[in-house]
Image: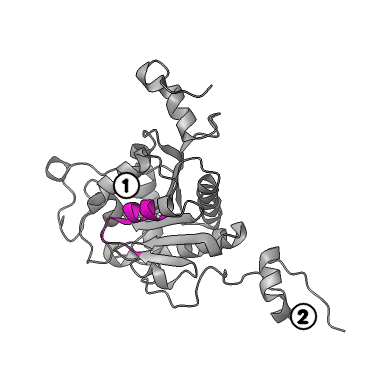
Amino acid sequence: MAKTNPVTLPDYQVERIGAQIGADETIVSARPHALSDAIFNYCPGCTHGIVNRLVAECIDELGIEGTTVGIAPVGCSVMAYDFFNCDMIEAAHGRAPAVATGVKRVHPENVVFAYQGDGDLASIGTAETVHAATRGEKITVIFINNAIYGMTGGQMAPTSLPNQVTQTSPYGRDVNSAGYPVRISELLSTLDGVAYVERVTCDSTAHIRAAKKAIKKAFQTQIDGLGYSMVEVVATCPTNWGMTPQAAFQWLRDNMLPYYPLGVYKDVVADGYANAAEAALERAKDCPIAQQNKED
């Protein structure tokens, strides 16, 4: 009789594919149900694929695939509607937070997330991003920051680092003419409608696990109705950086992480508040007009 090896899949995966597991097999990984079997169109070494899987795993584990609506951006992840099995909507460039706002307000029972890159979110979509956050829209945003415009050929992005060489900054980003990079997590963490913001990366197994934990917490923040949530993923773009995937990860560690430090930038629950609204009220405690209609 063949020896039965332990199955290391999560329970929800065992229930889904258990009949396919042989008595002499040990299955350690399986495609999340929320992730379709479509072939990714991302470049080799790009971390979009990792993050797509993490989002799908979180959707599976939270059991929300049937009520989740994702908003696909314009950029390298423009075809995200092919990669997730939940309902997906394609948004115009930069408008994902506006579309997500509309969906969430019409269907507040749904879990709504926007998946955006830095050109989409931090450039053409800056206004939509800031105002959705400050309104405290109960949506979740997954923000991929690879410091460059990936899909359109490697132009300088709002997040490109000082002195970083791109197609439109061949001598390096000159902060005297182009200004400084936008630190999105730091920016959004100052807004009262925001409940949770964390910056993560996917350059190692430990960091991938931490990234998944952050994404799951961001979804849970929305499910609990606490306010706006965002996870920023510091990512690589080997193709447009002109590097191997291994060299790109090292460049990320040497240059991007010092400029974009990892960590939690806002967590109102950890700060002792029930939600973003309660934290905002406390922050404005010395403003009489802001305290009007305060619930006892």
Q: Say if the magenta span includes residue 282.
A: no
Question: Where 171 sits versus 226, above or below?
Answer: below
> Please, which residue is most extreme toward the right here?
1
Residue 128 in picture, x, y percent from top left: 29, 48
Q: Nearer the viewer, residue 237 or 13?
A: 13
Which mark is first along the chain, 2 or 1?
2
Q: Say if the magenta span includes residue 93.
A: yes
Question: Where 230 sits versus 241, above or below?
Answer: above
> Please, which residue is most extreme toward the left here?
177
Residue picked out by circle 1:
129
Q: Nearer the viewer, residue 123 or 169?
A: 123
The type of residue carrying mark 2 is Asp
Identify the residue at horizontal 46%, vertical 34% (top origin). 276
Residue 210 in picture, x, y percent from top left: 54, 50
Q: Is residue 26 visible?
A: yes
With 91 as the anchor, is 22 left or right in this view?
right
Q: Residues within 10 Å of mark 1 (few under 14, many from 20)?
A: many
Looking at the rendered structure, the number of numbered marks drawn on it comes to 2
Which tag is nearer the camera, tag 1 or tag 2?
1
Residue picked out by circle 2:
24
Residue 157 in picture, x, y percent from top left: 23, 53
The quarter in which the N terminus is drawn is bottom right
Q: Which mark is residue 82?
A: none
Question: Where 78 sits versus 108, above or below?
Answer: below
Identify the residue at horizontal 37%, vertical 33% (top origin). 190
The type of residue carrying mark 1 is Thr
With 178 as the anchor, is 24 left or right in this view?
right
Q: Nearer the viewer, residue 40 or 165?
A: 40
With 75 as the anchor, is 141 left or right in this view?
right
Identify the residue at horizontal 71%, vertical 66% (top origin). 8
Bounds of the magenta segment: 90-103
Q: Secondary structure at mark 1?
A: helix
